[in-house]
Amino acid sequence: MKVYIMIPSVVLVMFEAVEVILPTVTGLMGILENHTTMITGLDTGIMLVKEKQANGVTPTNWSSLALFSGVAVIQKNYPFSPAAQKVVQLPEKDETCVVVLVSDAEFSKNLDPIATKEAYLEAQSRLNALSANTSASKSDTLLAKWTEKRTRARYQVTQTLKA
């Protein structure tokens, strides 16, 4: 199964995967080879990818990314235009293809756990203060909710798979 993570006009990364877990708007969704064709909305959250190993050994390592809302397309073969197909390695015939189109994505390995925790706690504190303030504007409260959700995803992805 090929997994493409794309932000506007750029293929950020391509994985050969055995399993994928996506943060959809209705909860977490697991995807395996031969998954049914579908399109689903993605929420801000953590995406997990169990990468396929070249030697055929069952993989144990997961990669984690923070995704920031978008859509996922799951189907056999590559679902986009011939021009786009020149940019990426195409899946084999009848291979499951997962294309994740998001506004932004960040790998856990590129994030500082301490800085992301501080940003999350600050965003959480601001949201709590605005929620308690009855005179706070709706736009300020919505921005604080969006910021808290985004910083929470960034923090949580740094904590994922640490066992």
Image (spheres, grey):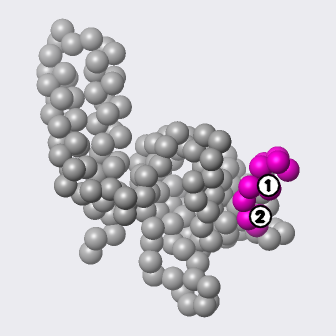
Q: Are marks 2 and 1 in contact (CB under 8 Å)?
A: yes
Q: Can you see residue 49?
A: yes
Q: Would you place residue 104 above or below residue 50 in this image? A: above
Q: Is residue 84 magenta?
A: yes
Q: Would you place residue 156 above or below residue 34 in this image? A: above
Residue 28 got which mark?
A: none
Q: Is residue 149 magenta?
A: no
- Residue visible at 18% across and 9% down? 135
Count the labels in the image.
2
Q: Tell me where residue 43 appears, x and y as whole percent.
A: 47, 42
> Dot 1 corresponds to which residue?
85
Give the amino acid at mark 2. Answer: Leu
Residue 90 got which mark?
A: 2
Please tell me whether mark 2 sits on a helix, a strand or a loop: loop
Give the left or right position of residue 27, taking residue 143 as reference: right
The quadrant of the picture occupied by the C terminus is bottom left
Residue range (magenta): 80-91
By secondary structure, the bulk of the magenta-drawn segment is best described as loop
The quadrant of the picture occupied by the N terminus is bottom right
- Residue visible at 57% across and 44% down? 7
Q: Quadrant of residue 63?
A: bottom left
Q: Tell me where residue 145 appears, x and y as whole percent.
A: 31, 30
